[in-house]
Image (cartoon, coloured by chain):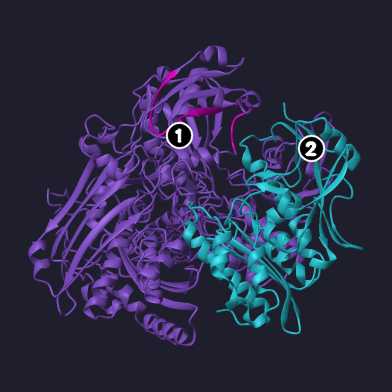
Chain colours: A purple, B cyan
Amino acid sequence: MKDTGAIRLTVNGARHDMIAPPGRRLSAVLREDLGLTGTKVGCDAGDCGACTVLLDAEPVCACLTPLARAAGGEITTVEGLTDETGTRLKAAFLRHGAAQCGICTPGMLMAAAALLRRDPSSDRAAVEDALGGVLCRCTGYAKIVDAVLDVAGQDRPVTAATGAAVGAAIPRLDGGPKVDGTESYGADLFPAGALLVRVVRSPHFAARFAFGDIAAWAPEGVRVFTAADLPGENRFGTIPPFADQPALAEGCVRMRGEVVAVVAGPPEVVEGLDLDRFPVEWMPEPPILTLDDARAAGAVQLHGSREGNILIAGRVRCGDPGAALDGAEVVAEVAIETPFVEHAYIEPEAGAAWMEGGVLVIRACTQAPMMDRDDTARLLGLPPERVRIIPAATGGGFGSKLDITLQPYLGLVTLKTGRPCRMVYTRRESMASTTKRHPARLRARAAADAAGRLVAMTVDGDFDTGAYASWGPTVAVRVPVHASGPFRVPNYHAEARAVHTNNPIGGAFRGFGVPQAAILQETLFDDLAIRGGFDRLAFRRVNALRDGDRTVCGQRLQGVGIGACLDALAEPWRDALARAEAFNAAHGGVRRGVGVASCWYGCGNTALPNPSTIRLGVTAEGRIRLHQGATDIGQGANTVIAQICADALGVAVADLDLVGPDTALTPDCGKTSASRQTYITGKAAEMAGRALRARILAMTNMGEDAVIRPEPGALRVSDGRGERRIDLVALEPDGNGYVLAAEESYDPPTGALDESGQGVPYAVYGYGAQMAEVEVDMGLGTVKVRRITAAHDVGRAINPALAEGQIEGGIAQGLGLALMEEFVPGRTENLHDYLIPTVGDMPEIRSILIEVPDPEGPFGAKGLGEHVLIPTAPAILNAIRHACGARITRLPARPDRVLAAMREAGR
Amino acid sequence: MADQARPETLREALAILSDGGRVAAAGCTDLFPATESQTLPGAVLDLTAVSGLRGISATARGWRIGATTTWTDVLRADLPPAFDMLKQAAREIGSVQIQNAGTVAGNLCNASPAADGVPPLLALEAEVEIASVNGARRLPLARFIAGPRRTALRPGELVTAVHVPMDTGKGRSRFLKLGARRYLVISIVSVAARVVETDGVAEALALAVGACSPVPLRLTEVERALAGRPVGELAEALDVGAVHAALSPIDDVRAEAAYRREAAVTLLRRALADLTGQGRR
């Protein structure tokens, strides 16, 4: 049987005769040939399970199933999950907030459906076994497992009364499409006839290169573009003064995966091209792959102007730490090393481009549409208004999708050919070429007095920022500001340097270097507490910042919640210590331990402007439109911003129509990063809501307590004394077509840092503390995290369910950082050598939401997204040490390292 | 151009294979991850439609596991306790999705040093049934896997089944896997142990270790020293030096070599203790 003739396929009960190679991946057949894009592709290797479908009722990875295998069988995809089990599952996923970014959701639903159809009363262990083959990077799995276990539960959607949206655990407003498979990600939508775009990448860390005869290589209909074809300035970067990265390398490459050529043409031709045969001659050069080599005297300088390969150094100094350390009662010192950490979102970069009139439209996954627009426009030599960025639903980002990736290649192809085009990164491309968490090599000393009060701390460290600047400056500046933790340290000096190597780019990853610094500081504080004979939690409580205290930057704080977070852990801490002690008295081969760690994190850019603007408009028909430009990559901005706005305006959430994000439709809400959207865009939404309300009340002469109800063609406004009606049809529409509108901007009031790092780097901070309970196998060094109790001060929980989801997801990433994640450039560019936690690795999580209102945040709210990851790893490391004595200084705490450290500790 | 043959009889399959240049495929759980192409590259012989290749049956001389038997098939088969370790390994291979597609013969032919299916089959003294247009032959599994990613298959040959002799299908068995996470993980070390107990004495036993040598290994020397001892002493009596001498692990992204050696001993002891009624640890 050769690949001739049709292959009969039954999908969701419908028969299709497919003319396609029998060895074609079923995932490609479903998505490309049948348009069933509910089945997602994350790795093409069976490592992530996103493409799980049912073949004769059994779950299989569609990416590993050749078309011929599926012929004659019954295939069910998420689109066909319409039986009672399926319908209930989808409702349970929505009810429990089991979908964040939603990219793994179809795979999770299919795996769960297969289990429940076989055994409707499956227990937790069976559910975990069934879901073990589907990776989720957002949720920490807790709400997914809860949803599957509660499939029979009653569907009682939480709704919020008008004026009471803030604080209500309403299901996410954009959740429906995520749980029924209709959400459209970067790879799911492209115009008919779109060219397929692929790129030629460097296999070397450092090399010069020259092209051969490209014209002779390119098959008919295939176009090739190189740096010479780029109309604009071939340089981009997230922080303009440091922009140093070419979209297409010119003569030399500084990292693996760097792009040298763009290839575009008909999909059937381009898909089959062997790009290893692309005519380029590489002349490899000795790469710089370690911090030591980068900083060695005489080392090759990656960028001419950056001496010693140092991109930037950040410093904070207050008091006289040297003198204070010398005379202190209790002194401790630690040094740690952390590896590259990969974001490992399940959606590889994907998007499409086309022309609309004279405007280049790029629809791709992103966290920062306006930055994409400006960078892409500059690279392509276009004015910004001729580029429109429409963020696709984004299947996870965690910082990496802040940087542009495929946008310039899509734009270049469409601009040069006039044709629409599309591109999807392979998993390997995504892992090899996109940014990572900076590896860190850090040292710290700290001292306390006899009463356990911190007197001094010094921190010094290098961060491997890789080949290009990206967010290296942010990491170098943020770390010294945060490395004290949320504690009073009267004498302090911290310096952090971002150092160039030929490694992958160190970019933004949930926490911008602060998680690495927290590992250093929190393990150091355990040393101090143990050495001084203080209870580890009490030591932190004594030193915790309070309202009115000054930070190491000299900033006076209000609304400080770290004390409340630590207090919330006091009782769980006593109980856990007692439980561990009792267990350890009865067992030898396995020992339990308890650890605690805290966090603080400044929300928004460090001492730099980062405004958000929100527009609200009322149409003549009586619809209220919220132009919401903050990209929701799963964290929940679409819901939270609407909740804030609804209460500020005084309408129900359901009265708001969400518009955007879209650079043509929504004002700039900045980037989804630095835990800034709830606070900064939320504040803009609050201000816009209040402004529109004030206008409506003034027009109707109504009191502060008036209720606004939109209806067709009118607004009805009533208070205790009476009711007025605004006839919207009678009003003149503005340039945006709105008869009533408000637009407000908010930029956090920060102040520049001086050369000692003194100033007001952030207007709002969030706080948290987590306690980990672990079990260590004394024979193997394996660690099982049993429970994490997480207390986070969110100021005001705008949506408690979404906040919990953030906590659980952050803990999963923190657990991965602590125990298993280590990206080795050139070696772990897949999801089976690079490990992220599965459902079976997650502990029980108890979230405690603390609300110490912030004077600046909307309704008192503070940021949360990054805070939740920061304490997890150090809490786990401190618990490991408590359990077995192992002091882990090189992450991750792989079993072999734990066992070795245990031996070193004499256990 | 990629092309794929999907015959329905073994005779047809062998004839196609004898023409040369084809890769035999079943679950494709190793073939697809090896390519970024959307279609299996090269010429492929898909065996999953061949009748008689899938399933487990009891024979007069033991058990026959057909080449395209999936790991899920193994899990659901009615087999004696000597096969418990094989089922325990089946449950640890990839995920449910992988177990539904991946096959027993595929796991052997892929010849990964860390193949979880191999240690239990070594401890069952499995034989590999091989066929070609020229006839059939059998090889002990230990000789079939010739090296990392290498087998003793000659051009035109196909694995058709794995046989477990009646004699070695006896006793109780245990498989233990050590990985850096719970699911979907390549083993740092895996061990399989089978003990045949008569009147409290280990009449026969089989031990195998995966991911600690170029190919998974039977520990025959170690077994010999333990045979005939009271089962309660097996774990304690395990000759650590002999285990270490037999293994030749490497340092890689998962663990260091020295740790693998030590973990192999720990896991073997635990498996033996589990099997002989001693509590773990």
Measuring 66% from the left and 41% from the top, which residue is drawn there? B32
Residue A421, quarter of picture: top right
Looking at the rendered image, the quarter that the C terminus of chain A falls into is bottom left
Q: Nearer the viewer, residue A50 or B250?
A: B250
Q: Is residue A385 left or right of residue A142?
A: left
Circle 1: element type: loop
Marks 2/1: CA distance?
Answer: 34 Å
Q: Position of residue A20 (x, y in %)?
A: 76, 32
The numbered mark 1 sits on a residue in which chain?
Answer: A
Q: Is residue B2 left or right of residue B57?
A: left
**Nearer the observer, disc 2 or disc 1?**
2
Three-letter amino acid code of the residue under disc 1 = Gly
Three-letter amino acid code of the residue under disc 2 = Leu
Q: Nearer the viewer, residue A177 or A256?
A: A256
Measuring 67% from the left and 79% from the top, which residue is drawn there? B229
Seen in the picture, residue A202 relative to A112 is either above or below; the reply is: above
Q: Nearer the viewer, residue B61 or A691?
A: B61
Q: Are callouts 2 and 1 both on one chain?
A: no
Q: Which residue is under mark 2? A: B45
Measuring 64% from the left and 74% from the top, which residue is drawn there? B272
Q: Position of residue A529 (x, y in %)?
A: 25, 76
Measuring 22% from the left and 56% from the top, which residue is drawn there? A481
Residue A69, quarter of picture: top right
Q: Position of residue A660 (x, y in %)?
A: 47, 43
Q: Nearer the viewer, residue A128 or A449?
A: A449
Query: Dot 2, crowdedness within 10 Å: few (<14), some or many (≥20)?
Result: many
Read off the magenta span. A189-210
